[in-house]
Amino acid sequence: MPILQWLDRDKHVKAAEGVPYRLLQADDAHSAGDEASPNMLIQGDNLEALKALLPYYAGRVKCIYIDPPYNTKSAFKQYDDNLEHSQWLAMMFPRLQMLRELLAESGAIFIQLDDNEVHYLKVIMDEIFGRSNFVSTLIWRKKSGGGQDSQYMATEHEYILCYKKGNFQLLFDEKGIEEADFNKSLHGKKCKFMKLEKWGASAHKEDRPTLHYSIPDPNNNPYFPKAPDGRDGRWRVKPEKLDEKHKTWVEKDGRFIPYEVIYYDEVKDKVKTVKERTILYDLATTTDATKEIVAIFGSKAFDTPKPERLIEKILSLATEPDDIVLDSFLGSGTTAAVAHKMGRRWIGIEMGDHAVTHCAPRLKKVIEGEQGGISEAFEWQGGGGFRFYKLGSTVFDTEGRINPDIRFAHLAAHIWFSETHTALHKKATKPLLGVHNGTAYYLLYNGILGDKRPDGGNVLTGKVLAELAAHDGPKVIYGEACRLGPARLKALGITFKQTPYDVKAR
Ligand SMILES: C[S@@+](CC[C@H](N)C(=O)[O-])C[C@H]1O[C@@H](n2cnc3c(N)ncnc32)[C@H](O)[C@@H]1O
């Protein structure tokens, strides 16, 4: 497959591996609402924040929306949008790799950009997500007037590339059958008539000659279909289907016309799915987004916000209530605000000071029942909460030693992720972390078996083994040392791994 080349590419595509795992440090002063809320607002460079999330959220995020710097060569109030072209690619590549790991198999990622970088992004996305996982490019019409913003033409639109990871299903708008459309009555039943002669595109005899044939009309004369322009037409269906569908004749201008009859009672419980179109034409514009910011902050406090309705459209295509939504270039906090109002769980990452000055206050207002953007449509009344986090200490030092501040549950999440490449769903409180593909994983650390002396219970002995939950199958046990001989380990189906040397999560 052709790939994009740039200076130092080989180094950049491996950058994610070299990023240390960090803990996320909760900061109560900037958190708001329900303390048990799973929603996370993280301040920090997303390269490190995404890595910190991996052991806990790999494969769990249903929808990622990002609106990264477009590389417009502008200096905005809150951030600089001016990277050398290959530096922009170097910035995006490892972040997209980690975003892919965080995405659920049934999830989708949406990335918004303009002409500056979108075509280069398409090529690196094909490489990272796979060409066959490309879903669509949405075109968002961002303004309604003209403008002089480009040298040659007034640019009216931006792009949103959508990729899936595995078995993503786009959630289409489902429309119920409209009773008002059934404005005829036959045999005392409400119904509507549908022409059997083809209309619209390819309605002529020459388009489908085999579908131009006659049926006897009520006077027993041969009836040939006509196109709307009066030329020889064709039927919508083959002869055998026509017999089945043909229910009535209607006389019009001295001519009988055959119709299919559809009874309301027979179809009223059906829903028809309406496919989404790729051009988001009349949704909301950058002007609407700025109005939303002014309503929240009292001034044009952020240069490049997106309107809430645009994000709502994306989240309604890809998520359902309680799904996890992630935006790692959070800006003024639009994605988190919209996800919150729509009842989705969310994680937002922003490295600038505006994580504190814009995102946190905006989301606090949402919790208090802020009424801008999509609030009315979702009958938003307030509620919920979020926790604010900063990047904390590294889990392993540069020598690979485990940071002594690391508690059992955190090391457990890291070891589980390094072994299974999935996230631990529950906070670990016991040595048996779980079973993956038939193998059970155990961790002896921090005196988890109740022995609070330093190193107590962290050594695999016969006595410790007897205290571990049984598993009928292969077992991997992490501990500081092992007193069981190789023959016994083999007989018991145990692979012993020594902390910290055998921990690959570094
Ligand atoms: C175009 S803005 C996003 C606007 C947002 N969609 C909104 O509606 O407000 C891009 C944001 O990404 C942030 N950003 C850029 N690089 C980042 C990084 N490495 N880690 C975290 N945030 C970053 C910038 O500070 C900026 O706020």
Image (tube, helix red, strand yellow):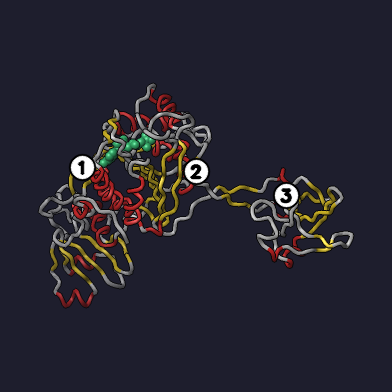
Q: Give the residue type that dot 3 points to.
A: Asp
Please provide percent x and percent y for residue 283: 50, 37
Residue 229, disc = 3
User: Of callouts 2 and 3, which one flags the residue occurring earlier in the amino acid sequence?
Assistant: 3
In the displayed structure, does residue 197 sit left or right of residue 105? right
Q: Quadrant of residue 226?
A: bottom right
Q: Which label lies toward us, 1 or 2?
A: 2
Residue 277 x %, y %: 52, 47
Q: Amino acid at mark 2?
A: Ile
Q: Amino acid at mark 1?
A: Gly
> Left or right: where does residue 372 sit relative to residue 461?
right
At 20% from the left and 50% from the top, the residue drawn is 7
Labelled pair 1, 3 in contact (Cβ < 8 Å): no
Mark 1 / mark 2, whichever is N-terminal: 2
- Element class at badge 3: loop
Q: Where is residue 177? Give x, y as percent.
A: 66, 48
Q: Provide residue 453's location: percent of width, then percent of height.
A: 13, 54
Outermost residue to the right = 219
The quadrant of the rendered image in which ligand 1 is seen is: top left
